[in-house]
Image (cartoon, rainbow, N blue to C red):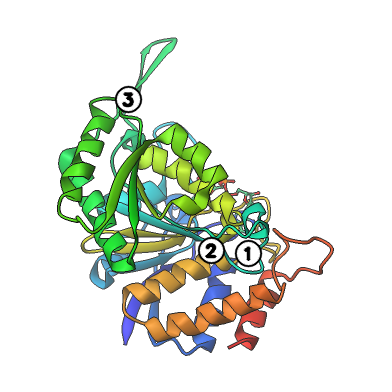
Amino acid sequence: MNKVAVAKGDGIGPEIMEAVLKIFNAANVPLEYEYVDMGKWVFDKGYSNGMTPAAQQTIESLGILFKGPMETPKGKGVKSVNVTARKTWNTYANKRVFQTLHGVDTVFSKAGIPIDITVVRENIEDTYGGIEHMLTHDVALSRRFITQPGSMQVIKYAFEMAKKKGTRRITCGHKANIMKLTDGLFLQTFYDVAKDYPELKADDIIVDDLCMKLVTRPDQFDVVVLTNLQGDIVSDLCAGLVGGLGFAPSANIGDHISIFEAVHGTAPDIMGKNIANPTALLLSGLALLRHIGLMESAATIENALLYTLEQGVHTGDFGDKAVQSLNTTEFSEAIIANF
Ligand code: NAD
């Protein structure tokens, strides 16, 4: 049986992870879980990378980590556990799928405009190196690095994924008109890779224009690949198009280790209340199941989730407030009842 590492995370993490694994168990998903110590609470115990050596060893031997959101410790010089994990295991491609979900009303679903956008964000480079310093007392300097090999690996992944998905269009979002060297290198690499995929329509768009077009005609886009910071911002924008962060899953893909997690954070404002929406983590879990070939289990759970949402059954973070909303536990039980 397949085995994956599970880190429950901080804040609402344990609540939504419990709900998702309950759904997996009810669907008899043939998967074993090895719980690992990772997160802000581990950082607080003195482990500066937010995980114990045993956790790191387990994740490296199993190759798959299913994780809840983790709080970024506050303070200068302290690194995010999430960013550290992505860097440690070179999960260079962050794939985020944003799809219209029936029952989740948005301005676009009401207008009959279907959305199916996959954002592939470079996950390691860019300004996320955190190389910053004060040049003088009133001037702060940040360094941005973009490499050709780093760009190549994420762009190749995006093209391969687009081909497998049967996509018609792949678009590179960038700001190469201003950042001619860094974004210019990313864009050049995009067109170099495009030569190997003549069946795909490859084009590019300046990132500000991309944002404007995404909020007016999101149905024009299929796969969009971007550098790290721009990809981070654009993917939250896309989450808003399909109903918000509660519906935004993500997969951090590397050659040896992949991490599946929701896009959202630890939601400290609602932690411990059992009201968080587990859908984003559940969708991330379904991506995990498909990644390891458990297609049937993924389809069974996805159908039950979609049917539940279509019935108008949901948690209280979105939708018609007049309809009684369910808490996290009740919502997961409603999904299980629809298998
Ligand atoms: P957040 O995503 O935690 O919360 C933003 C808003 O969305 C809040 O109002 C919250 O209640 C709501 N929300 C988020 N997820 C929800 C869910 N599943 N159901 C219902 N409502 C939900 O963003 P934040 O407040 O900026 O960040 C809090 C912490 O999370 C920070 O420490 C941040 O660094 C961390 N974070 C972690 C990850 C990760 O683990 N990958 C990602 C983003 C932020």
Ligand 1 neighbours mark 2 (CB distance < 8 Å): yes
User: Which mark identifies residue 238?
Assistant: none
- The Cα atoms of the two marked residues, 1 and 3, are separated by 40 Å
Horizontal side, residue 308 vs residue 296: left or right: right
Horizontal side, residue 104 vs residue 8: left or right: right
> Which quadrant is home to the C terminus?
bottom right
Mark found first going from the N terminus, 2 or 3: 3
The residue indicated by pointer 3 is 177
The residue indicated by pointer 1 is 277
- The Cα atoms of the two marked residues, 2 and 3, are separated by 35 Å
Q: Nearer the viewer, residue 149 or 278?
A: 149
Residue drawn at point x = 20 percent, y = 49 percent: 194
Horizontal side, residue 310 vs residue 82: left or right: right
> Which quadrant is home to the N terminus?
bottom left
- The Cα atoms of the two marked residues, 2 and 1, are separated by 7 Å
Query: What secondary structure is found at the residue carrying circle 2?
Result: helix
Residue drawn at point x = 34 percent, y = 54 percent: 169
Instruction: Name the amino acid, label 1.
Output: Asn
Q: Nearer the viewer, residue 229 or 26?
A: 229
Tell whether label 1 touches label 2 (CB within 8 Å): yes
Horizontal side, residue 255 vs residue 267: left or right: left
| Vertical relation: 46 (above or below) 53 | above
Mark in the foreground, 1 or 3? 3
Characterize the local packing of mark 3: few (<14), some (14-19) or many (20 or more) Cα atoms within 10 angstroms: few
The residue indicated by pointer 2 is 280
Q: Nearer the viewer, residue 51 or 69?
A: 69
